[in-house]
Image (cartoon, coloured by chain):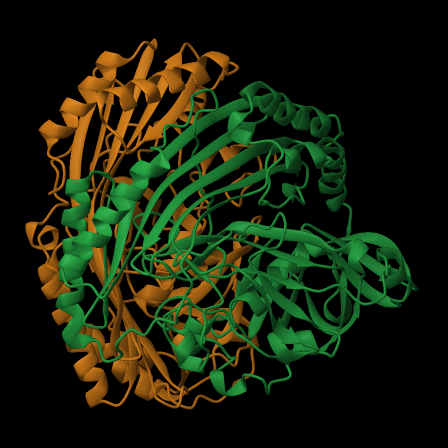
Chain colours: A orange, B green
Amino acid sequence: MIWTKEQAKALADRVLSFSKAEQTFVALNGGERANLRFARNTATTSGASSGMSLAITASFGKRSGIVTTAQFDDQSLQRALRSAEEIAKVSPENPEAMPFLGSQTFLPATAYFADAGNASAEWRASSVETAIGLSKKKDVVSAGFVETQASIQAVASSKGLFAYDRFTAADYNLTARTPDGSGSGWASKSFNELRLLDPAKLAGVAIEKAALAKSPAGIEPGKYTVVLEPAALADLLINMVFAADARQADEGRSFFSKKGGGNRIGEQVVSDKVQIYSDPSHPLAPTVTFDNEGLPLSKNMWIENGVLKDLLYSRFWADKMSKKPTAGPNNVIMDGGKSTMDELIAGTERGVLVTRFWYIRTLDPQTIKVTGLTRDGLFLIEKGKVTRPVKNMRWNESPIVALNNLEAMTPPERVVSGEGVGGAGFSVVCPGARIREFTFSSTSDAV
Amino acid sequence: MIALGATTGLRPSTVLLASPPASELRDLADAALASAKKAGATYADIRINRYFVQFIFTRDRRVQNIVNTEDYGFGVRVIVDGTWGFASSSVVTKEEIARVAEQAASIARANRKINAEPVRLAPVESYDTSWNTPVKKNPFEMPLQPKLDLLLQIHEEALKVPGASFVSAFMQFVNEKKYFASSDGSHIEQSLIRSYPSFSITAVDKGTGKFYSRASLTSPMGMGYEYIESYPLLREAKVAAEEAVAMHKAKPAPAGQKTLVLHPTNLWLTIHESVGHPTELDRALGYEANYAGTSFLTTDKLGKFDFGSKIVNIVADKTQESAMATCGYDDEGVKTTKWHLVKNGLFVDYQTTRDQAHLIGQSASHGCSYADSWGSIPFQRMPNVSLEPGEKDLSESDIIAATDDGVYVKGDSSYSIDHQRYNFQFSGQTFWEIKGGKITTQLRDLAYQSNTPEFWKSCDMLGGKSTYLLGGAFSDGKGQPSQSNSVSHGCPIARFTRVNVLNTER
C-alpha cells in the first residue's frame, strides 16, 4: 500500500521536530510500481518495486545543504539531519536562496484512480497474453512493456507548509515487427485510469502498421509536407517547452531571448493556430497539484494564438524580475483542430505520414533546431492518399519553424511521445498535425 | 543511447558510512535465498545495495547546491518453472525479504503461461569474495572545502577572459556498495567509486543576439578524487572561455565530404553509439525492439561481417583500469573479463549475460549483467568498449600533418543514431579546419553524419597509445523502465575519409 497522508505528515513532523536548522524543508516521494516486459512473442522480465525516499534541506540564512535517505528510523533521520546541517554550515551563502514556502492552498487532487493502483500481476500478464496472441495470429513478432504504478508526493516546511498528493499511471506500449525484419509498427498509451487502457486496440494498431510498413523503399531526403501522428508532434512540442526557461532567455542564451536584452513574451513566435498550456486538472491528464517546492500548480498559458504568453520562472528569477513563479509544470497540453487524420492526409499533395520520432537531440540552441529520426512506420502520401512505405529518414528541424508551418490539426488526445515523454509522471495532450516544408537530411536503413 | 539529464545526489562526507557489517548482509541474503527456494524457485539471487552520491553545483561565482543522497534497498530475482520474477523493497529486514521473495515467485508464476522460452543460465563459478575500485583518494572521505574552492576558481579563470558571460561547474561522486548472493553459492561484496568534474562556459554577444557554449572535455571516470586533482581544470577553463568567445568570429563550417580527424573526447561517444550498442546481444535478438531498438549486427553476421577497415580492433573490457563499467563481478556473479568485439575489422563477438549466451551457442557469459538500482532488474548492459590504438605510436601532429583537407573535432555535443545503429549524426565542442597538413582556423556550427559500417570502413589512420584517452558517461540508457549504466570508451585520435560534414546553422 502506498503511504497515506497521515503517514507522510507523521514522518514530516518527526523530521521537523528533530531539526536544529533555522529552516527545514522535507520532500517525500515514492510508491509502488510493477511491470512486465515481453519480446520475441514471449514474456521476458517482470518485477515489482516498493520504495520511499526522503530529501531534507537544512538551512541557516542563505546557506543550505540537502541530504536524502531511504531509512526512516529516528537514528537514520537524526544522522541525515545532522549531515544536512553540517553541509549548510560549511557552504558559502547563496545570494539566490529563497525562503521555504509556508502554508498554501491547492486545487482538489484528481490524479489517483484505484483501478490502476490495484492492478495485479495477473492483469499485466493477461494484457500481454492478448498482444502475444494477436501477434502470433497475424504472423508478427512483438516486444512491449506494461507498467502500473501508484505514487505519492509530499512536502513540508518549518514555516507551516504541508502538501500531500498521490497519482496513478498505467502504461502500455509495444512494437510489432514482421518476421523478415522489413516492417515495424508501434503504439503507446499512458493513462491515470486503468480502464482507459486498451491493450488489444494498441496491439491491433502496432500489428497493422507493421504489415503496412513492410519492405519500404528510399525516397530523396529534402523538404516534405509531413502529417504527424500525435506521438510525433508531441516530441516537437516538448522540445520547445523545455527550452522555455525565463532566466536563460533574459540572459541572452535562448531562442526566447530578445535581441539587445530581455525576452520575447508578447511576441508572435509560432502560427496563430497554436495554443499551449499546462493544467493539473485537465481531465485527460490530471497531475499532482504542487511542485517539488510546494508551489501550487494551476492552469498556465504558454502560447496563445501563437503569441508567447509566459516562460518558466524559478522562484528566484520571478522574484528578481517581479514576475509570478512557475509551478512545475507536470503536463503540457496543445489544443487541436477539427480535422481527422484521414483529412490531413487527403489534403496533402505530396508528403510523408510519420508514426513517431526517435533519438531527438538539440543541434542548435539558438534556434532550437533539433535532430532526430523517424521510426516504426513512415509512409509516402501522394495526391491525398498513402501510397507506400518509405525508408526512415533523419531530420534536422526547429519546432519553432514546424509550428509556424502548421496547416491543420486533429482534436487533441493523451499521448506518449516517441521518446517516451507523456508516460507516468509527466502527461502530454496534443493533436496530430499537417506541417509543410519539414527538413529531412538523409536516409536510414533502419527498420 | 545516452539519456538526457544527469544523475544527481550525494552522501555526507562528514558522516561515517552506516552500512551493516558483511556478516549481517550474509544473514539477510541467506534468508532471501531460503525464502525463494521455499517459494518454488530453482534459482535465486539477491542484491542488497546502498548508493551514495555527492553532487555539488556552482553557477556564476556561487554555490547553488550541495546534495548528498543515500539510497538503500534490496532486489530478489528468481526463476520459477523456467520464468523470471523479480521484486524489491527499500525496507531491509528479514520479514520484508521473505515477503518480497514470495512476491518475486508469485510474479514468475503469473507470467509462466506466457513464457515460451524457459530460462537457461550459463554455468558460473561460485565466489566468496570482495572487490573495490582501487582509488587513491576516496571522494566521500574528502572535506567539502577544497571541492568548493576548486569549482569557484574555475569561474574566476573563465570570467577573466573578455567576452565570457556565464559559467557553471559541478562535481559528482558516486559510490555503489553492492552485496550479491545467489543460489549458485556466491557471496560477493563490491564497492565501486566514480568521479566527475565538469563545467560549461557561455559567451553571449548582445549585439548580434548570438551565444556559444563550450563544455569541459572531462569525462566521468572509475577513479577517486585523484582524477580531479590530476586534471588541469583551471587551465582548461581559460582555454574553453577563449574558444567560446572565439566561436563568434570563427569561420562557418563547410558542408560536404571531408576527411575527419576525431579526438578521443569526441570519438568515445561515436564508439558508444555505433559499436557499443549494436554489439549488445539482447538488441540483436529483439529483446529491446520496443525501446532502445534492435541491431544491424544480426546473429547471422557473427564472424562474417566486415565491420570496419583492417586497422579497426575493438575490445569489450570490464577490467580496464579507471573505466566506469569496471568491476570485479557483474550483477549475476560472473567474474569480469576482456574480449574482442571487432578484430582486424571483422565483427567477432557480442556482449552477453548468463540467460542469453546459449542463444548464440556460447557456454559462458561475458559478464555484462547490471542493474542501476536495488529496485531494478539486472539485464545486459554495456561493458567498457574501446578502440585499440594503432601499432605505430603516431601523434596528433603526425595525423594532422598527413591530412591535406579536413576538419578536426574535439569534445562531444549533439548526438543521435537510429534504432538499428546505422545512421548517426554527431557534433562536438570545438571544430578546426585542417589545410595542407596544418590546423588553420577555428570553425563553428559543425556536425558529421554517416552510416556505421561505411564510417568504420573509412578509418584509415589511428593515433598511437600516447594519444589514447577514456571518455564516458553515467547515462547509458536502455530497458523498460529505463535504466542508466556507467560506461567508458577508450580510443586514440583517429582519422576517417570522405565523411559527410554539415553546417548546422543552415
Q: Is residue B485 left or right of residue A295?
A: right
Instruction: State the quadrant of the C terminus of chain B.
Output: bottom right
Q: Is residue B360 above or below residue A121?
A: below
Q: Nearer the viewer, residue A279 or B72?
A: B72
Residue A281 visible? The answer is no
Which quarter of the figure has residue B42? bottom left
| Picture mark count | 0
Quarter of the image for residue B69 reads top left
Q: Residue at image x 29%, y 60%?
A: A416
Residue at 71% over, 65% down: B388
Task: Find residue B74 and report its horizontal and vertical position in percent.
Answer: 28, 45
Q: Is residue B22 above or below residue B31?
A: above
Question: Is any atom of residue B369 visible in this view?
Answer: yes
**Residue B20, percent from left and from top:** 33, 33
The answer to whether residue B168 is left or right of residue B110 is: right
Q: Which percent across, then down, holds residue A434?
A: 37, 70
In the rendered structure, the answer to whether residue A424 lies left or right of residue B424 reads left
- Image quadrant in which you'd find residue B355: bottom left
Could you tell me which residue is drawn at 17 percent across and 69 percent down? B111
Q: Tell me which residue sits at (47%, 63%) in the image.
A: B367
The percent coordinates of residue A423 (x first, y second) are 28, 55
Viewer-side residue, B503 vs B28: B28
